[in-house]
Image (cartoon, rainbow, N blue to C red):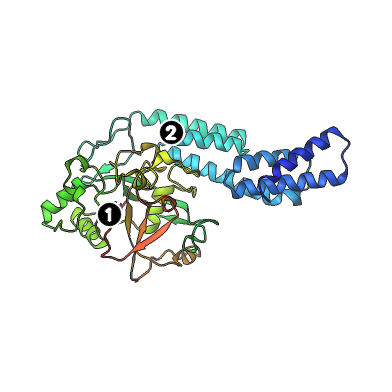
Amino acid sequence: MALGRYEEALALRRTLASSAGTPEYVDELLECMARAGEAYLAAGDPERAASLLSELEELDAPSALTAELLRGVEAARQRALDGAWSAIEMRAWAEAEERMETCAKLGAGVGQVQDLRRQWAEARAASAGWTYDLSSAAHPPPAGVTFPEGTYVNKKDGSILVPIPAGEAIFGSPGKGADREHPQFRATLPGYYLAAHPVTNAQWKRFVEATGRSTRNLDRAYADRRKSDHPVVCVSWEDAVAYCRWACVELPTELQWEKGARGTDGREYPWGSKWDDDRCRFDGNGDSAGRRTCGIWEYRQGRSPYGLFHMSGNVWEWCTDWYDEKVYERYSRGDLTPPASGKRRVLRGGSWRYALSCRTAYRSYGGPAFRDLSGGFRVARAL
């Protein structure tokens, strides 16, 4: 049922409040409210759905009528609780606060929310004494930018490697998006490290100077000192693998990349479930505005739950996997073995040329030798 029907529910409720109300009015009101709640869930607004569920419970709606809505709200509440705990573990304080507020709005128990707030306060106080040194990074982060404890610098290329804890996460799309993103599923990955940002022109220059690799196919921005902190582009999958071998790292798997981009709660973008023009470099503020890539420390408000920059937009990023359009169907059944062969490799994240492809579940591909002005990569390493 369309969300606009909620207005009908409100009108019916006013009628009910101003008169004795007939059984027909009551039945239609309750059904309309239940369907509107389900529509809000489908539209990604569980808080409004929870509000409607609360009203339905006050009106003693039959359990058969609210069962689907109740299941949806309970699932959203559990995702919010899991997300809050995960944010606390990652020392993502602002993210944890937002999650705790969402938990309360979705009807989490008072004790649950109080326990979350206590753990948040204790972890934040304890972290005040934690330190890690990123001064040797190819691009030390600006003041105010922090990462989870355990983050370190890879000596060979200066990449900042951020720990992604082992555990379950949500992958794929529930309904929207192309068939290759379906179905949505849960899977557990071992812990690993993922770079805080894509490999830059300055880092690629270090690689070229050490190995003598040709720069013939690179974009002219590579030689522009003003863009030393921009992601290197026009690198093929084969180029990226060669860089990783030199730097003693590897390309992330597709599932490692996706978990790093969206955390554990299946969010649509690294920062949440709603699009925001100001949180990444995409077509609207990139190609259509006469701009291409941007510096790696820009758009800090668009960081992923683990603090990673540019998991949405700026440049496409190579993954190590062969591309298989239907592999998520197999993954959803519990077999997480990557495709053994293929003709194309996985690309994720969208770029300055696109908007729709900046969703965390969006899957794309390119041949191993493919190069593009919007294509780059970031590195990973096993824990």
Q: Which mark is residue 66?
A: none
- Of 124 and 138, the residue lying toward us: 138
Q: Position of residue 312 (x, y in %)?
A: 39, 47
Q: Please report the residue visible at 72 percent of the width from the left and 48 percent of the height from the top.
A: 66
Q: Position of residue 287 (x, y in %)?
A: 34, 48
- Of 304 and 224, the residue lying toward us: 224
**Residue 172 as seen in the image, left or right of residue 224:** right
Q: Position of residue 95 (x, y in %)?
A: 46, 36
Q: Position of residue 158 (x, y in %)?
A: 21, 45
Q: Is residue 90 visible?
A: no
**Residue 186 as seen in the image, left or right of residue 154:** right
- Residue kind at label 2, given as amino acid type: Trp
Total marks placed: 2
- Residue at numbered disc 1: 373
**Residue 58 as seen in the image, left or right of residue 195:** right
Q: Secondary structure at mark 2?
A: helix
- In the rendered view, tell whether residue 61 sits above or below residue 371: above
- Of 66 and 85, the residue lying toward us: 66
Q: Please report the residue visible at 46 percent of the width from the left and 67 percent of the height from the top.
A: 326
- Residue kind at label 1, given as amino acid type: Leu
Q: Please report the residue visible at 71 percent of the width from the left and 41 percent of the height from the top.
A: 7
Q: Secondary structure at mark 1?
A: loop
Q: Nearer the viewer, mark 2 or mark 1?
A: 1
Question: Which image quadrant is residue 14 in?
Answer: top right
Marks 2 and 1, how far apart in space?
36 Å
- Residue at numbered disc 2: 93
